[in-house]
Image: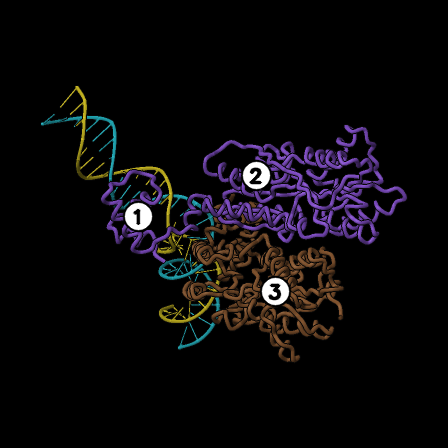
Chain colours: A purple, B brown, C cyan, D yellow
DNA sequence: CAGGAATAGGAAAACGATTTCCTAACGAAA
DNA sequence: TTTCGTTAGGAAATCGTTTTCCTATTCCTG
């Protein structure tokens, strides 16, 4: 690998000059600039990014912190971030945390140490530790899928979970459902999770329907908890005609439970999902669900982040559009 | 952030000495070692990895090159690699290539430039460009899911695709199926893809069954192609009683096709998948499939790689165990 | 035409580590 | 007692860049 010195020697100039034509950091006469350019070309020279990082205290690395890469929801986000980042010359350092605070912090330290240019952060709930890290290290960050008021003043890209859940519920109510269950995400530490139940409850209230706590099951976004929740809710003497699940994976679990109880969907039971991940399409019946543009959230997160990194663009809060995609799992009573 | 100089000053020694206690690279008297250790502790000093990388020409980064992070098969691999790497103090640089040679090479260049310690590489087929890159750059590499004879002498971790497909086919034959279709992966450039058809064909031959080319459909591992392939095969006048798909995603697509044609699975048609990704469990009927321990492949890849990076361990070819996991999509005639 | 501003380009310091090279001190052997 | 080998630790070079500081030239302007 050739270095800047080789280029300088070949072009008959000093390394400073080479650096200047490389970064356009100071005017260089066009004849010597040409000589340098030719030398660069001839040697196939590429500036060493490690050395660059050392002096600039800023690398071309973007950290993506997520709970679980093996979950289609998060992997879609990562794909979005990667695509946008690649376009702008950044690479992705993948930080898989299992949703564990300690691991999150550990990875943040690694990112700081590597002079990461910024980080896209997705966590169930933003903690003080997170916020103070970003404040102190001055590392640009954008929170993905996090309500604006919990980001500690940092940028965010998300959808309006409250409204989405509200509209999902309204969708069911419009189809004459009056008895509606809800399988939620963890309520203690998931911020968008509580927003979704609240949107659900509000829609009930606004339509004069009583909220029945025995039809609310607190899951953890995994298949298993959707299944268990479904069993719990559907085995009661009086059961709902529709169940809204806070994500697709739980909805799919619920589908299994319904099948096990011989409750055909959508004839006997309507099921509404949330997210529109791959599985919504492959399951039978296909899932009617609320699409969250998760890949786009990734892209916009990266875009916003890079804006802050390079342009000193203002911090901002983006809310992307969601939509109800109708497939086969809901019907009017 | 404190530097090695700060530590040296506080401990009243030279930076060389600090470096020595840090790396155990030369003996240091125990009293001065203690002073250094105390200083390190007091300052909360952590050596700067970028500076380290610059002089050592080796970072703590492992590149993971895959076609598509948003595919559960690849994301499971990445998870395996990440877990093992994290344990050993390495971080993951994610390289999503879309299966495109140009992007693969581009990412390899980035990895070289960043002094990546090694790379886990998963591609449809190893090309000359790949091999020569690894030879020239001397970057340690392990190929995941690649047959030994195509790795150009580098390490690999995989399963025996030929035998797995052979056994899968035998499984069907043992259940009295004599008319068996096959939906394959791309045959032109996927090495494990052709191995699987070949295992299939061989099992047919060994059991005195004729291979019928009209029941072979060349897909591309995606849902859509499984669906199309299913339609193509099942709409013929004479149709097979079982179809073996080269991966789960296509098997799920095929399930849709069968449903559309009112062919109940497994009563009228047995479907056998391959991989055992998440979707095998969530689909109805649940998929009988050949489990490829993909997360373990990731782990072992990382393990092997780190062995080569650190210990100069010999190159090796690992074949992990697969198994047929019986669920609901196959039955005896 | 003299003097000061502007300009181009080089030398050297800096980033934060590792490692080579050197020296002082010590101990053992002759 | 002299000498030589060993040892611990410091000074300085190095990795490959960027950037500051400085100097020599050119160009105006009065």
**Dot 2, how many residues are within 10 Å of its Cα: few (below 14), some (14-19), or many (20+)?**
many
> In the figure, residue A211 lies in which quadrant?
top right
Residue A242 in the image: state x and y as whole percent: 79, 41
From what the image shows, is residue B200 above or below residue A247?
below
- Report the residue marked by disc 3: B183
The residues bearing labels 1 and 3 have C-alpha atoms spaced at a distance of 59 Å
Residue A12 in the image: state x and y as whole percent: 24, 50
From what the image shows, is residue A272 above or below residue A198?
below
- Report the residue marked by disc 2: A142
Question: B134 or A168, which is in the foreground?
Answer: A168
Helix, strand or loop under label 2:
strand
From what the image shows, is residue A306 above or below residue B172?
above
Among the two numbered marks 2 and 1 on one chain, the one whose residue lies closer to the N terminus: 1
For the question of whether residue A260 can be seen, the reply is: yes
Q: Are marks 2 and 1 in contact (CB under 8 Å)?
A: no
- Report the residue marked by disc 1: A15
């Amino acid at each position: 690998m050739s270095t800047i010195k080789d280029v300088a020697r070949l072009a008959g100039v000093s390394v400073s000059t080479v650096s200047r034509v490389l970064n356009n950091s100071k005017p260089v006469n066009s004849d010597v600039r040409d000589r340098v350019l030719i030398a660069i070309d001839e040697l196939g020279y590429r500036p060493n990014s490690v050395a660059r990082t050392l002096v600039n205290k800023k690398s071309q690395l973007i950290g993506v912190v997520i709970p679980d890469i093996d979950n289609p929801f998060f992997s879609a986000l990562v794909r979005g971030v990667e695509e946008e980042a690649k376009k702008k010359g950044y690479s992705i350092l993948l930080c898989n945390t299992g949703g564990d605070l300690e691991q999150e912090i550990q990875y943040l330290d690694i990112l700081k140490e590597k002079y990461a240019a910024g980080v896209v952060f997705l966590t169930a709930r933003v903690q003080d530790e997170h916020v103070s890290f970003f404040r102190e290290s001055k590392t640009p960050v954008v929170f993905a899928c996090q309500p604006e008021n919990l980001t500690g003043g940092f940028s965010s890209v998300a959808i309006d979970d409250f409204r989405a859940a509200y509209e999902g519920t309204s969708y069911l109510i419009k189809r004459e459902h009056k008895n509606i269950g809800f399988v939620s995400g963890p309520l203690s530490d998931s911020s968008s999770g509580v927003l979704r139940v609240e949107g659900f409850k509000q829609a009930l209230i606004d339509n004069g329907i009583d909220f029945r706590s025995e039809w609310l099951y607190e899951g953890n976004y995994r298949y298993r908890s959707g299944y268990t929740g479904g069993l719990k809710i559907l085995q009661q003497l009086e059961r709902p005609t529709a169940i809204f699940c806070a994500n697709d994976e739980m909805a799919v679990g619920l589908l299994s439970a319904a099948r096990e109880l011989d409750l055909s969907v959508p004839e006997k039971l309507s099921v509404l999902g949330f997210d529109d991940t791959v599985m919504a399409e492959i399951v039978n019946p296909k899932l009617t669900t609320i699409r969250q543009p998760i890949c786009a959230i990734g892209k916009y997160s990266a875009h916003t982040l890079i804006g802050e990194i390079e342009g000193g663009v203002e911090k901002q809060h983006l809310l992307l559009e969601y939509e109800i995609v109708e497939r086969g799992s809901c019907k009017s009573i």
